[in-house]
């Protein structure tokens, strides 16, 4: 290890020379890997964010129960207690007309001006029921049998659809990881073989001088790792600008939507993509070295 640390300058110079030897080809390889990792990063970050949104919505799953407005206060209290007794039900809140109106004003934002055209409050009071999403089927079944309930609003269809989308993105991500790995390994191994072929005389000289094979091979491995890391960084920068635009668009249009912070998404991207890039670069370089020896 000390030998390698002492020769860091030599390794970096050799890596630079290997890259410059076929500059156009290597620049194209860098851009190609960057584009490949960009698509992969986009899918992985989308899948991760979608999964988090689904999890957030599931944790905040609730039903809105609308009842006969002719019911008195005592009957409403009895209805609330009846709902609390259902298995899988958490907290239960009574939402009055004024609060329902205020909530809709928050949801509509600037569009809330349209509510001023109503002479009376168009919203009805309701009972907000927090539930265990896994038991939504049995809860809905029991609620339908409770006397006094007119209508139940739930977001089960939305959750099911989002879960399907998240699962589809996850499967697409697995396929893209496989395709990215194969493509990157081919590109890097080809680049390393080309570099070894171009430096054949220099390699033979190093062998005659007694340099060990790992010492000779290290600059080529380093070149492959740096190239894929460069592609990964390029991909993350591209996705950063897309996420910045996406978050500005989503937050402006749907301010109440619970989405993971952009910093968290970027952190997850760096955490997954850069180690993957480094691993594929090292593996591709080793494959290229072994192919050259054979």
Image (cartoon, helix red, strand yellow):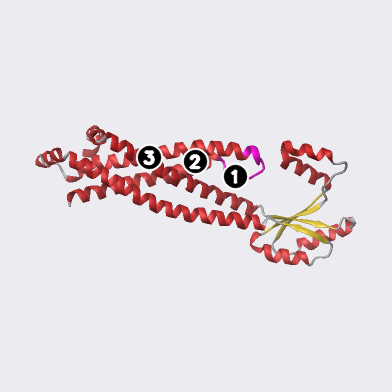
Residue 260 is a magenta residue: yes
> At x 29% / y 35%, what residue is drawn?
24
Which circle, 2 or 3, is nearer the viewer? 3
Q: How busy is the neighbourhood of tag 1: few (under 14 within 10 Å), some, or many (20 plus)?
A: some
Mark 3 vs 1, N-terminal side = 3
Q: CA distance from mark 3 to mark 1?
A: 28 Å
Residue 77 drawn at (x, y percent): 84, 58
Predominant secondary structure in magenta?
loop
Mark 2 vs 3, N-terminal side = 3
Asked whether, in this view, residue 156 is left or right of residue 195, the answer is right
Asked whether disc 2 touches disc 1, contact meaning CB atoms under 8 Å apart, the reply is no
Q: How busy is the neighbourhood of tag 3: few (under 14 within 10 Å), some, or many (20 plus)?
A: many
Residue 11 drawn at (x, y percent): 24, 36
Q: Which residue is mark 2?
A: 266
Asked whether, in this view, residue 235 is left or right of residue 293, the answer is right
The disc at residue 231 is 3
Circle count: 3
Element under disc 3? helix
Q: Which residue is mark 1?
A: 259
The image quadrant that residue 255 belongs to is top right
Q: What range is drawn magenta here?
A: 251-261
User: Does any portion of residue 171 appear in the rendered image?
Assistant: yes
Element under disc 1? loop
Element under disc 2? helix
Asked whether, in this view, residue 289 is left or right of residue 253, the answer is left
Residue 201 drawn at (x, y percent): 13, 39
Residue 21 is a magenta residue: no
């Amino acid at each position: 290890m000390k030998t390698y640390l002492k020769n860091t300058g030599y390794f970096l110079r050799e890596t630079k020379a290997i890259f410059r030897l076929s500059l156009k080809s290597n620049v194209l390889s860098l851009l190609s890997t960057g584009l490949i990792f960009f698509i992969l990063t986009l899918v992985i970050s989308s899948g991760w964010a979608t999964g988090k949104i689904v999890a957030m919505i599931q944790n905040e799953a609730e039903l809105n129960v609308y009842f006969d407005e002719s019911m008195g206060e005592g009957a409403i209290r009895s209805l609330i207690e009846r709902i609390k007794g259902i298995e899988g039900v958490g907290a239960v809140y009574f939402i009055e007309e004024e609060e329902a109106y205020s909530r809709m004003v928050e949801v509509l934002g600037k569009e809330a001006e349209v509510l001023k055209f109503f002479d009376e409050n168009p919203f009805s009071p309701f009972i907000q029921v927090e539930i265990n999403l896994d038991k939504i089927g049995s809860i809905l079944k029991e609620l339908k049998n409770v006397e006094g309930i007119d209508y139940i609003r739930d977001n089960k269809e939305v959750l099911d659809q989002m879960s399907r989308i998240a699962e589809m993105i996850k499967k697409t991500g697995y396929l893209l990881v496989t395709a990215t790995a194969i493509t990157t390994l081919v590109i890097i191994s080809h680049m390393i073989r080309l570099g070894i072929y171009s430096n054949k005389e220099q390699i033979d000289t190093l062998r005659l001088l007694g340099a060990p094979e790992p010492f000779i091979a290290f600059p080529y491995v380093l070149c492959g790792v740096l190239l894929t890391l460069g592609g990964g960084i390029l991909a993350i920068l591209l996705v950063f600008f897309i996420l910045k635009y996406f978050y500005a668009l989503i937050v402006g249009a749907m301010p109440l939507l619970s989405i993971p912070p952009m910093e968290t998404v970027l952190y997850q991207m760096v955490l997954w993509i850069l180690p993957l890039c480094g691993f594929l670069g090292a593996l591709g370089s080793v494959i290229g070295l072994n192919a050259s020896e054979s």
